Image (tube, rainbow, N blue to C red):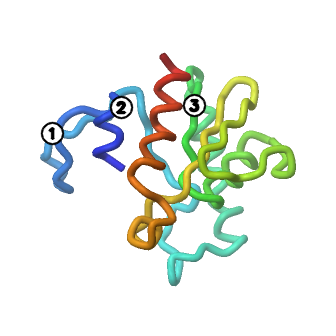
Amino acid sequence: LYGTLIRFGFAEGQFKADPNDGLALKGTLITNAVRCVPPENKPTTVEIKTCNDFLIRQISALPRLRAIVALGRIAHDATLTALGERKSRCAFRHGAEHDLGRVRLFDSYHCSRYNTNTGVLTPEMFENVFRAVRAYLG
């Protein structure tokens, strides 16, 4: 994730998984649809719903927000709920873009080790999503 953010100008510095590595996000916020780490990394509907109020507050606190990248279907659905959109209006699909008025939602498969190791998500696929975001934002 961080290498891709750096490559497309959403962060600068080097990521070394250390708070003192000098990495700085640029006009970017990273947040989670689910704030806790659920058992087996599979959040329940209750956990997703409970955390959605936090996501609503975060989105509301960003008046200049223009783009959101959802990493996975859970993030996609949680974002639509937070924005008051119907899920049936915007189906999740890797590489899809959804114009939601004040913000555009970009979908990507989650960049989990499982998805990257099995080829569900390749570096090129992931970069193409951020390339589209960069083109949209200018």
Horizontal side, residue 93 vs residue 113: left or right? right
Marks 1 and 3, the one that precedes in the sequence: 1
Amino acid identity at mark 3: Ala
Q: Which residue is mark 3?
A: 67
Q: Nearer the viewer, mark 1 or mark 3?
A: 3
Q: Residue furthest bottom?
A: 40
Instruction: Give the residue drawn at x 24%, y 32%.
Output: 12
* Mark 3 vs 2: CB contact within 8 A: no
Describe residue 68's horizontal placement relative to residue 99 as left or right: left
Give the spatial CA distance, label 1 vs label 3: 25 Å
Q: Which residue is mark 1?
A: 22
Tell me the mark number nearer the camera, choosing from 3 and 2.
2
Q: Is residue 6 above or below residue 33?
A: above
Q: Earlier in the sequence, mark 3 or mark 2?
A: 2
Secondary structure found at label 2? loop
Q: Which residue is mark 2?
A: 8
Q: Secondary structure at mark 3?
A: strand
Amino acid type for the residue under numbered disc 1: Gly
Q: Which residue does the image show at 67% across and 52% down from the upper left?
A: 93
N-term-proximal mark, 1 vs 2: 2
Label 2 packing within 10 angstroms: few (<14), some (14-19), many (20+)? some
- Say which amino acid is labelled 2: Phe
Circle 1 SS class:
loop
Q: Position of residue 80 (x, y in %)?
A: 73, 46
Which residue is depicted at the point 35% across and 39% down?
5
Residue 20 is situated, as x and y percent measured from the top left of the image, at: 13, 47
**Horizontal and vertical percent position of residue 52:** 66, 54
